[in-house]
Amino acid sequence: MDKELIAYLNYLLCTKIERVSPISGGDISRAYLLESTTEKFFCKINGQNKALAMFHAEKKGLQELLKTNTIAAPRSFQVAAYEAGAFFLMEYVETKRPCLEDMSVFGRQLAQLHQLSNSQTFGWEEDNFIGSLNQSNRRHVDWTSFYVQERLLPQLYLAFEKGLLAKTDIPPGEKMDTVCNNLFPKVKPSLLHGDLWSGNFLISKDGVSFLIDPAIYYGHHEVDIAMTRLFGGFGDSFYKAYREIIPPEPGEEERKDIYQLYYLLVHLNLFGASYKPPVKRILSAYF
């Protein structure tokens, strides 16, 4: 982090940053811990030309989560252009390794978040991002239509454009509609985090659950749960507490595959061909 940016952050924060330390912050941005004599802050920097739009969308998602009063999210201080990209300055959360009770609380709070509904449409008031990829949130009144048209097909077409899938790998939209209609129950729109893997939640040192890096929209609550299970799961205490508020419905296991397909396609498009086998397995099994 250069001296000019540090000076600008000093001005924004009305304090003097004494120490800047690189920390882990995800796959697409550089992350730093900023320390003054009395406070700590978190700053992300991304050099992509879409970074300003990405960080504005992330800030809006965090603020929307905060408004729900269900799960905490870091306070956002500033998003601004920086060189060819942008930076995002926010609250720094001191974390700890979660215990079983922490995960139970988190499970209950996530269920409370999922009980929030706009009761009318699937989608969101604007498009946002999943990782660094565009995520379309055009509103639909039908969940199958939304999921096929705004989630699966855009990622399938992108994978084809990148040469990661053949045209014959992409099922006809009508077939996808039929399969999803048969598998999906009557769905009430729930407010979703949208990218809920283990790297996108924190437990603070005083046991408070925090969500970070949201890709929010209104969708089926099982989408968030499917994502939690994609890379190892969150532990029995989390799922038990969640199920006490939102019990499972028949067919959830099959829907898990369909919902994980979206995230596997995202990983295919972001990180390459190592994600092609699980994508093709699900496409072959269901479509």
Image (spheres, rainbow, N blue to C red):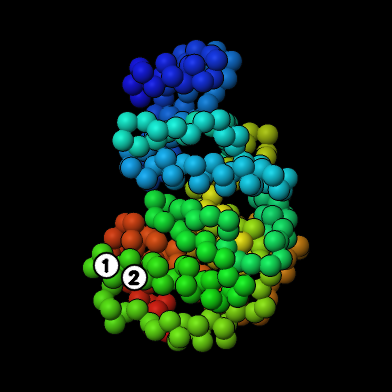
- Asked if residue 19 can be seen in this view, the reply is no
The Cα–Cα distance between marks 2 and 1, rounded to whole angstroms, is 6 Å
Reading the image, the residue beneath label 2 is: 157
Label for residue 38? none
Residue 164: give x, y in percent of width and height. Answer: 26, 68
Residue 206 appears in the picture as rendered: yes
In which image quadrant can residue 186 be found? bottom right
The part of the image, by quadrant, that contains residue 73 is top right
Q: Position of residue 132 (x, y in %)?
A: 39, 51
Could you classify mark 2 by the number of other residues whose Cα lies within 10 Å: few (under 14), some (14-19), or many (20 or more)? some
Amino acid type at circle 1 is: Glu
Seen in the picture, residue 237 relative to 181 is either above or below; the reply is above
Question: How many numbered discs?
Answer: 2
Say which element carries label 2: helix
Q: Position of residue 51 (x, y in %)?
A: 39, 42
Q: Look at the numbered disc 1 and give the secondary structure of its residue.
A: helix
| Whether label 2 touches label 1, CB < 8 Å | yes
Tell me the quarter of the image containing the C terminus: bottom left
Question: In this figure, which residue is indicated by the disc labeled 1?
Answer: 161
Q: Nearer the viewer, residue 253 or 48?
A: 48
Relative vertical location of residue 201 with respect to residue 92 in this rendering, above or below: below
Horizontal side of residue 111 vs 256, given as left or right:
right
Based on the displayed image, in which of its 4 quarters is residue 241 positioned? bottom right
Q: Residue at x 47, y 67 (%)?
A: 151
Residue 99, x across and y down, in percent: 64, 45
